Amino acid sequence: MGQSILTDIKNAAKKSLKARHNELADTQRQMDILNGRLFADGELPYFKDKIAQTGQFPLKPKKLEVLQINVGYMCNQVCEHCHVDAGPDRKEIMTRDTMELCLEVIRNTGAHTLDLTGGAPEMNPDFRWFVEEASKAGIKDFIVRSNLTIILANKKYHDLPEFFKKHNVHVVSSMPHYTKGKTDKQRGDGVFDKSIQALQKLNEVGYGMPDSDLRLDLVYNPSGAFLPSDQSAMERDFKKALKADFGIEFHNLFAITNLPISRFLDYLIASDNYEDYMYALVEAYNPAAVEKVMCTNTISVSWDGWLYDCDFNQMLDLKVASKVKHIKDYNEDVLNDRNIVISQHCYGCTAGAGSSCQGTVA
C-alpha cells in the first residue's frame, strides 16, 4: 500500500465515518458490500450456507448469560479500526430513562454478567449513577470496557480507578500492543503513554495484581489485515514486556479478531485488502467456534434501547429477529425462541480459535 494512501487513512481517521459523511456510515452500504460479488457470485459461501454444512443453521440462542449495554458512542479517541465508529463527534448517549428500563431487566434477567461498553462508557453523564444502581442488582461479573486514556483525559475522570474499586468493577481495557509504535498507529499519537499511566494507576489501587479480586484484563486486536495469533502466547509476551518495562500487572489478555465492518471495513477497502481478508476469514472457519460464539449467550442493548444478538450486529443495525425488539418490551422467554441474525461478518467470530468480547472461544 502506498505511503500516500496510508497518510490519507490516518488523517481521515481523526473523525468518525459519520462526521466525514463517508458512505460506510450507512449500515445498508456496509451490508451491500458484505453481500456483494464475492458471495453473490459463489466465489465464497454465504455464512448461513457454511454453518448449514455442519448442521448448525439456524443459529439459536442458549441460556442468557451476558447483558451487554452500549451507553453511548461518544469517545475521547478515534481509533483506526473501531467497529462502533465512536469519537468525540458522536453524540448518541443513553438517557437515564433508558437506563431505568435496563435496570429493571437487570433485576429480573437470568444474566450473570453485565457488560457496559461504548464509545467510552465513562463519558455518559449518568455513567456513575448507572454503575451504582446496577451494582446493587447482584450481578456476578460487572464489566466496564475502558479505553484507559479516559482516566487521564480530564480531572473529573482521574478518580475512576477508585470508583471502579468501590463497586468491584471488572475492568476490561483496550491495549493493542505492548509497544508504543503499534499502539499509537492503531489508536492515535500519545495513546500508548497515557494507557501505561492509566494501567499503573489501576495497579496502584489493586487492579490486576496476582492475588487480587479486582480483575483487570486487556484486549488485543490486530493492527492490520490479519488474524490474531495464539492468545496464550500473546498473553505471555504482553505480561513479560509490560512487567519488565513498566512494572504493570494484569490478569488475562483477550485476543479479538477485527470484523469487516465500519472503520475496519473502510481500512480494508482503502488498502485493497478486503477480498484477501474475507478469503482469510472463510479459510480459517472453525465449526467448533460456532458452538460458543457470543451471540448464543448474549443480548446487546443499544444506547437507545434496541436489542441485538451482539455488539457487531448492533453496529450494522441488524435487530433481533423477534417480536420483542426493544428493552421496554423485554421478555426473555420470547427472545430465547428467536433465530440469531447472521451475515458474512460472522466469519470473523468463527475464524481460527474464534472470537468474542471475552477473547477466543474454541
Image (spheres, rainbow, N blue to C red):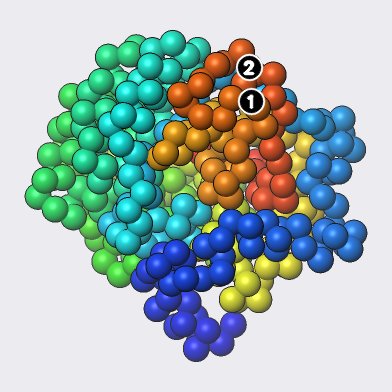
Q: Position of residue 40 (x, y in %)?
A: 85, 60
Lateral position of residue 326 relative to residue 172, left or right: right
The quadrant of the picture occupied by the C terminus is top right
Circle 2 crowding by C-alpha within 10 Å: few under 14, some 14–19, many from 20: few
Lateral position of residue 265 relative to residue 182, left or right: right
Say which of 165 and 63 sits in front: 63
Tag 1–tag 2 contact (CB < 8 Å): yes
Say which of 280 and 61 sits in front: 61
The kind of residue on which mark 1 rests is Lys
Q: Position of residue 257 (x, y in %)?
A: 58, 50
Q: Residue sitting at 21 percent across and 32 percent down? A: 128
> Closer to the N terminus: mark 1 or mark 2?
1
Q: Residue sitting at 36 percent across and 71 percent down? A: 14
Q: Position of residue 26 (x, y in %)?
A: 56, 61
Rendered image quadrant of residue 96: top left
Q: Residue sitting at 35 percent across and 20 percent down? A: 103
Q: Residue sitting at 48 percent across and 41 percent down? A: 254
Callout in the foreground (1, 2): 1
Rendered image quadrant of residue 297: top right
**Would you place residue 343 above or below residue 89 in this image?**
above
Rendered image quadrant of residue 267: bottom right
Q: Position of residue 326 (x, y in %)?
A: 51, 29
Disc 1 from disc 2: Cα separation: 8 Å
The kind of residue on which mark 2 rests is Val
**Would you place residue 187 above or below residue 60 in this image?**
below
> Element under label 2?
helix
Please name the residue that numbered disc 1 is placed on.
323
Residue 334, numbered label: 2
Say which of 235 and 341 sits in front: 341
